[in-house]
Amino acid sequence: MTSPNPASSAQSSGLVPVTILTGFLGSGKTTLLNHILKAKHGHKIAVIENEFGEAGIDNELLVQDSDEQIVEMNNGCICCTVRGDLVRILGELADKRKSGKLSFDHIVIETTGLADPAPVAQTFFVDDKVMQNYLLDAIVTLVDAKHAPKQLDEHHEAQEQVGFADRVLLTKTDLVDASDVQALRQRLARMNPRAKIGESKNGVAAVDDLLDIRGFNLNAILDIEPDFLNDVSHEHDDDVTSFVFREDQPLDLEKLEDMLGGMVQVYGAQMMRYKGILNVANDPNCIVFQGVHMLMGADTGPAWKPNEQRTSKMVFIGRDLPKDLLLKGLAQCIAEA
């Protein structure tokens, strides 16, 4: 089976290139996406971002700029329950672009950290309207150097994300020894010898290595996944769940850090990802709080707007999470009046 050259096909037909940005929970996808949106690359980018669970956080963490169109999908995982929504959103974006209501020349799809990229990529080859408007440019996979060895051992999704990648970017290499980074590079190269392996440091990577690289090769994918163009089913393990904590009253950041610090000492292996926007007492700015297993940290976010409802919202994703215990502990972090 042969396929036309994607670069010449895109140039001649006016197809909009699409980058699928994937990587396991906490690998740094949103941080890198913010870099892409801020960088001076001349592109007008539309973003479709998807989160696992009932409520999303990433849309609030993304830079907001009139040049970008950001569409959030948080009612399921993009690779299974909401794939029909992806087709619909791509169709709506194409219609608005043709009518002049929107202006963009590239789309970035940020998947949930639990997404298998195969069904997402398949969308660009099995739906007629999508095929008429878009070209799958590349699958870019972020790999957390600190947690990848364990994730690749335990999670099929992490393996699939590497196996389908056209580009692999290592993150958090400063948290591990150089010998561990080299061993991880060798493992990734064995898993996917056709993908170029680079690094993203502090969420920064060369945009020329991410956009318009024409990296996706259908024939290569068919070699490793002969049934790629057939229906690809995907289910998540039942013990991976998520829940959301919301609180309108201001929080005491020191209490929160102490409480979560104690929780991760006991349950850190189960706490795959936790992140949120926090309303901290006596602080004019929101606080961005993020964690992966035992690693967590807080950064100053944008200032709350004058009439904005100051609300804390945290999302937790993990295996067999002690939900009631976490919610009880979080409720005790409300600042004293």
Image (cartoon, rainbow, N blue to C red):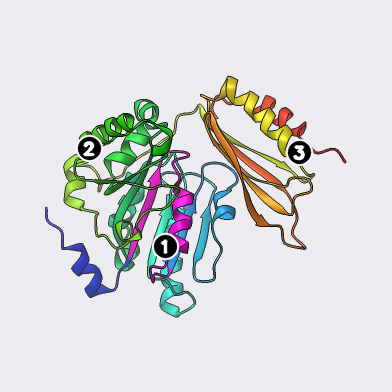
Instruction: Tell me, yes or no, if residue 54 can be seen here.
Output: yes
Vertical side of 7 occupied by 146: above or below: above
- Name the element at disc 1: helix
Looking at the image, is mark 3 or mark 1 nearer the viewer? 3
Horizontal arrangement in the rendering, residue 27 relative to residue 296 (left or right):
left
Q: Check whether the beta carbons of the residues at disc 2 and disc 3 lie within 8 A of each other.
A: no
Q: For marks 2 and 3, give the CA distance.
A: 45 Å
Q: Which residue is mark 2?
A: 189
Q: Which of 174 and 258 lies nearest the eye of the viewer?
A: 174
Q: Residues within 10 Å of mark 3 (few under 14, many from 20)?
A: some
The stretch of residues the image draws in magenta is 17-44
Residue 205 image position (x, y, % from top left): 37, 53
Q: Residue furthest left?
A: 1
Q: Which is nearer the N-term, disc 1 or disc 2?
A: 1
Q: Which of 10 and 237 lies nearest the eye of the viewer?
A: 10
- Name the element at disc 2: helix
Q: For marks 3 and 1, give the CA distance.
A: 42 Å
Residue 221 image position (x, y, % from top left): 21, 46
Residue 242 sits in quarter: top right
Horizontal arrangement in the rendering, residue 333 relative to residue 2 (left or right):
right
Q: Which residue is mark 1?
A: 90
Q: Which residue is mark 3?
A: 252
